Image (spheres, grey):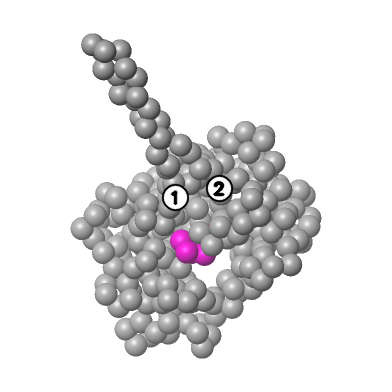
Amino acid sequence: MRLIAINFWFFEEKRYLFFQYSEIVDMRLKQASLSENQWDDIIDAMKCLKKSNKSHNWDFFVDTHNKFASHHHDDSPHIDGGNTTIHSPFYWLAWHRKFVFEFEKELKADGMRVSLPYWNWTENRKIPDHLRMELFGWMHITRAVFHDGDKLPTATDLRNAKNATTYAAFDSRMNSLHGEVHNCVGGTMATFKSPKDPLFFLNHAFVDKVWAEWQAAHPTLQFSTSILDASLAPWDNVKVRDVMSISDMGYSYG
């Protein structure tokens, strides 16, 4: 969704009204706030991406995640002498921010006016109705029996993560919470091919939102240089430092 801001200036004495138009970045909204038309557009864009023959279709993202989740892949970056994967501390936040961003970009590539919503699982304890498994038979996904989110992280769990005062604490707590969502949904979501399930992207969009808010609340805290200079494979010439600001990347959360 791309919005246009309108700023007003009213000069009472001369009764002039001026308009200034300025473009605002794409805004990701809470899934529970979307209209039926917005959901229809998102589902249509997802189906188009799945059916597409272009190189960066949905299957590309599934295969990329599966490939780079391996501890032994040759293209994985080496940070501080260790072999890093897309789920390694700190790196996972940046890699998945870029991954979801690129997926969203491909959803828009065919002229679809959509932005990925996010799923706040502390407020909405059920799988969103529009993403019920039976509606996504064309993705061939599986899920565990889901009992109204009884095992999803709670608002208290999320508050504990947000209250972290170091990157190490925030990273560890959010990684744990996001993993609990994967495992609670189960099935495909509990595998390295989890991006087959559209819930993957709504889950990671919410994680990204929480991270962006935490970054704004702790502007002086930063990753180490070794993390910031790590490459974000498979995207050529893109490093962690290039995805540290969502405003610079051109999107926001509503």
**Viewer-proximal residue among 176 and 137:** 137
**Viewer-proximal residue among 57 and 177:** 57
What separation in Å lies between label 1 and label 2 (alpha carbons)? 9 Å
Residue drawn 37% across the image and 66% down it: 242
Horizontal and vertical percent position of residue 105: 56, 57
User: Would residue 176 be found to the left or right of residue 49 on screen?
Assistant: left
Task: Based on the picture, tell me whether residue 231 belongs to the magenta stretch.
Answer: no
Q: Label 2 sits on what residue type?
A: Ser
Q: What secondary structure is the stretch in magenta mostly built from?
A: helix
- Residue 251's label in the rendered image is 1
**Secondary structure at numbered mark 2:** loop
N-term mark: 1 or 2: 2
Horizontal and vertical percent position of residue 236: 47, 77
* Up-down relation of residue 230 to residue 61 (above or below): below
Horizontal and vertical percent position of residue 228: 32, 72
Q: Is residue 80 visible?
A: yes
Disc 1 packing (10 Å; few <14; some 14–19; many ≥20): some
Mark 1 and 2 residues: CB-CB less than 8 Å, in contact?
yes
Residue drawn 52% across the image and 47% down it: 118
Task: Based on the picture, tell me whether residue 99 belongs to the magenta stretch.
Answer: yes
Magenta residues, as a range?
96-100
Residue drawn 43% across the image and 76% down it: 237
**Residue 54 placement: quadrant:** bottom right
Q: Label 1 sits on what residue type?
A: Tyr
Residue drawn 68% across the image and 51% down it: 45
* Up-down relation of residue 20 to residue 234 (above or below): above
Q: Is residue 122 visible?
A: no
**Residue 168 placement: quadrant:** bottom left
Q: Which residue is mark 2?
A: 115
**Secondary structure at numbered mark 1:** strand
**Viewer-proximal residue among 184 and 229:** 229
